[in-house]
Amino acid sequence: MIGKKILEQLNIFKQCRKYGLPLWQCPQFLFLVMGIIIISSSLLTYAIGSHYIEDPLLVALLVIIISIILLIIASTITHSFETLAETNRMKSEFVSIVSHQLRSPLSNLKWVIELLMSGKVCPVAEKQIEYFRILRENSKRMDELVSDLLTVSRIEQGRLPLQKEKASLKELVEKIIKETEILAKASNIEIEFIHEDRIPEIIFDPSQVKLAIANLVENAVRYAKSKGIVKIILKRDKDKLCLEVKDSGVGIPEKDQKYIFQKFFRSENAKKYQAEGSGLGLYIAKSIIEKSGGKMGFSSKENKGSTFWLTLPIK
């Protein structure tokens, strides 16, 4: 039993999967790297000591002392990283469990609200319908937040599924624009889609990439100024497709730009313009695009608008 545990600890790749961390951030891998550094330092110390110190016992003692000091430092650092990784894993599991548990009561709540609004249970006055609409809207926002939390949890644990297939990114964008039309009209915003004639089909997960692009388009519409235009540009650049979403909205302050893809972050001017929002959308979008083999970035000036761009490889 003890031998099995030791073997599991020595399995670096398994430990990295357990914590949901890339190899270069995994505590066990860092310990291995530090071990190599300690051995190299010990050999170097021995070579230098034997060259300048005549007594071999003194050289050996010096090497042992330096090795012990380095080993203690390495062990302390690795233990700290391991504690942080375990805490992060437990947090992700907690978020996942809580989100799953919240889904059932939220679904029941939505079903009950719809049933009461239909008037099948009992007659409903106009004022009551107004209250039910408020409840329905808030339950919808809660459901969206729970879905975002589940997606973040899957991303952090390396369990975000990608069902890749050959599909048209152009058609996907057209579908997103059609679904965003109501929001755009309500906000008095025009969406313009500019694309090249021959856009090849590529291999990606349409449902996940749709989630990422829809987030960019909806953000552009929400933060654009009234009677503004949101431009979506799709073009080919050698071995990749490039998509840009431009708006002339509130923009992002320079001091906030370095945090824009972090979880739960929303800039101050965004909060003033739109009170709603979890601050998870851009983190999720960037994670999906990078997992799909692409890149995402942006450029922005406060009060002059933003341009978010992404690329996906042509395979």
Image: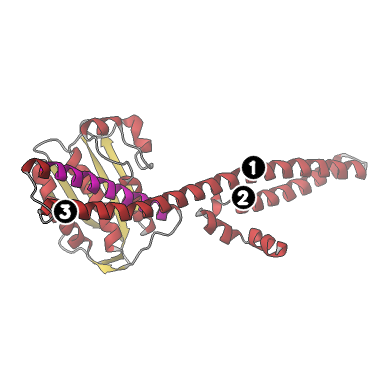
Q: Residue 181, image x and y in percent?
A: 11, 50
Decide: few, some or many residues near mark 2? Use Cα within 10 Å; few <14, some 14-19, many ≥20: some
Q: Tell me the magenta residue range.
A: 130-154
Closest to the observer: 118 or 307?
Answer: 118
Q: Which of marks 2 and 3 is nearer the N terminus?
A: 2
Q: Nearer the viewer, mark 2 or mark 3?
A: 3
Q: What residue type is labelled 3?
A: Glu
Q: Circle 3 sits in a helix, a strand or a loop, which is it? A: helix
Q: Which of marks 3 and 1 is in front?
A: 3
Q: Which of marks 3 and 1 is nearer the N terminus?
A: 1
Residue found farthest to the left: 126
Closest to the observer: 200 or 250?
Answer: 250
Colour style of the rendered protein structure = secondary structure
The residue that disc 2 covers is: 30
Closest to the observer: 265 or 36?
Answer: 265
Q: Circle 2 sits in a helix, a strand or a loop, which is it? A: helix
Q: Is residue 230 magenta?
A: no
Main SS, magenta region, reads helix
Q: Is residue 253 left or right of residue 232?
A: right
Q: Distance between the residues labelled 1 and 2?
A: 9 Å
The residue that disc 3 covers is: 114
> Which numbered disc covers residue 274?
none
For the point 8% across and 50% down, the residue is 123
Seen in the picture, residue 86 relative to 252 is either above or below; the reply is below
Q: Residue 280, image x and y in percent?
A: 33, 45
Q: Is residue 31 left or right of residue 294?
A: right
For the point 50% across and 54% down, the residue is 20
Q: Residue 62, image x and y in percent?
A: 84, 40
> Which numbered disc covers residue 77?
1
Q: What residue type is labelled 1?
A: Ile
